[in-house]
Amino acid sequence: PDSVRGAVEHLQTNAIAVVTLGFQGVDSTRFTAVYFPDPEYLVNRASAPCVFSPNNGPEGCYSIQAEITAGPNDRHLGVPDDDLIEHVLKGLVGHGIVTRSQLVVFADVQRFEQAYVVYTVGFERQVETVRHWAASKGIHIHGRFGAFEYLNVDGCVLRSIELASQLNRRPTSLSDISVGTASAS
């Protein structure tokens, strides 16, 4: 219906460009994440996936993922990949995270138009309109964007267990879930 379509159109999200750089060698900083409040550096956060598990990169290498969050139609989203990669690398060097002599063996840019929900004035009313309509159709709104809530991975897992309990009509826990599939019982 037009009222639901209108409610969805009023919901806002921020976009993100994720620049992943793979380096040969050992990560000497071992930071899990670094936040950059530098107005000249587009990156707001950089993380090092291999700190969490060495299996997140090939042996003898590590990676850094730099996030550039921007509002819709932000001019930074149109920066060519090579320029964005160079900007990220220059900033990582300038902030002492890596040295220019470290060999970059991999570079990738991924762009996502809808990465973070934006809480605007009145968004609760818009979301409730969508939720009410979806529920009337037997649709379970779920996940960060389905529920239009900023949820970390642990929040998504908790909400998934709650939804499983609702759908199963009994308490459901992580022990009921096997890797990759849900238990049939």
Image (spheres, helix red, strand yellow):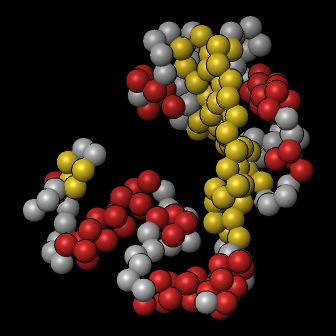
Query: Which quarter shows the N terminus?
Result: bottom right
Q: Residue at x 79, y 60 (%)?
A: 71
- Residue 34 in picture, x, y percent from top left: 64, 38
| Relative horizontal placement of residue 30, taking residue 153 as reference (left or right) | right
Residue drawn 86% across the image and 39% down it: 79
Q: Is residue 61 visible?
A: yes
Image position of 70 with respect to 125: above or below? above
Residue 76, given in percent of the width and then of the height, sits at 86, 46
Q: Name which quarter of the figure residue 2 lies in.
A: bottom right
Does the rendering let one see residue 149?
no
Determine whether 17 is above or below 29 in the image: below
Q: Residue 53 at x, y = what percent?
A: 41, 28
Q: Quadrant of the C terminus?
A: bottom left
Q: Quadrant of residue 33?
A: top right
Q: Is residue 116 left or right of residue 121?
A: left
Is residue 159 left or right of 108 when viewed as pictured? left
How many numbered callouts? 0
* Residue furthest to the left: 185
Q: Is residue 112 left or right of residue 183?
A: right
Please state the horizontal and vertical placement of residue 124, each as a whole percent of the image: 60, 84
Residue displayed at 54% across by 25% down: 30
Identify whether 162 is placed above or below 87.
below
Image position of 146 with respect to 177: above or below: below
Between 142 and 152, the residue placed more toward the observer is 142
Q: Residue at x 48, y 56 (%)?
A: 152
